[in-house]
Amino acid sequence: MEAKNTLLLVEDEPHIAEGLAFNLEEEGYHVTHVDSGEKALNALTTNHYALVILDLTLPGIDGLEVCDQLREQGNQIPILMLTARGTEQDRITGLSKGADDYLAKPFNLKEFLLRVAGLLRRTNWQQTPPEKKTYQFGNNQIDLETDQAFTENGIIQLTELEMKMLRVFFEQEGKVLSRGKLLKQVWGMSPETETRTLDNFIVRLRKYFEIDPAKPLYFRTVRGRGYRFIQNPD
Ligand code: CA
């Protein structure tokens, strides 16, 4: 069961819980249902959920208190609060306790499902910022997803090892990387290993990307120390 698709439903009225769980599962979510605030807090300390659907009026610890405690603990899980009370003040109280969204019963099922999807989308977006998909240096552009290089020499399909080496250089742009370090980070070899392979790779990268491979601007040799990649040479 994947945590990113598992929702915790906290609702003490069995028929409402059943109906919501059924419809959420129809949408492809996994649902864990508990019927009290205590059980909700327990479940949340032992398991990971993508979202909590939290009824406000519960026996014992109510929804507001659950919300409050979670946020006090630093738990930032998205919370959709459900309540029979629909006054503005209730809504404000719920939101000020850290709920992310609020829906007053009786609500439209479709709206409920849209709000769940909306909250999940927002958190997914927050948790996984879009990864940078290309890397540019000079007139070279590397597509980090397809491993293709767009260069003045045309489009080159890079091998896995070439990509690995480029990533090591890009991530440590401007730093001198010793042969030993490069061998270890790209090939996983110990520094004592033959360095000829590495030097051949550098020759190849220069052929792909340098305007004049004999006078490299990007993949530079640092005499006696190793290599250095410069993204924006003067
Ligand atoms: Ca209730």
Image: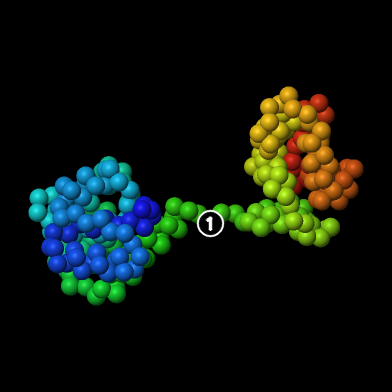
The picture quadrant where one finds residue 89 is: bottom left
Extreme residue in the left direction: 59
The kind of residue tagged 1 is Pro
Number of other residues with Cα within 10 Å of mark 1, as a class: few under 14, some 14 to 19, many 20 or more: few
Q: Is residue 46 above or below residue 26?
A: above
Q: Nearer the viewer, residue 223 or 168?
A: 168
Left or right side of 39 for 222: right
From this viewpoint, is residue 65 visible? no
Q: Nearer the viewer, residue 28 or 63?
A: 28
Left or right side of 142 for 114: left
Q: Is residue 132 above or below residue 115?
A: above
From this viewpoint, is residue 161 visible? yes
The picture quadrant where one finds residue 220 is: top right
Q: Which residue is mark 1?
A: 130
Left or right side of 90 for 125: right
Residue appearing at x 33%, y 62% in the figure: 29
Q: Nearer the viewer, residue 180 or 18?
A: 18
Q: Is residue 227 above or below residue 85?
A: above
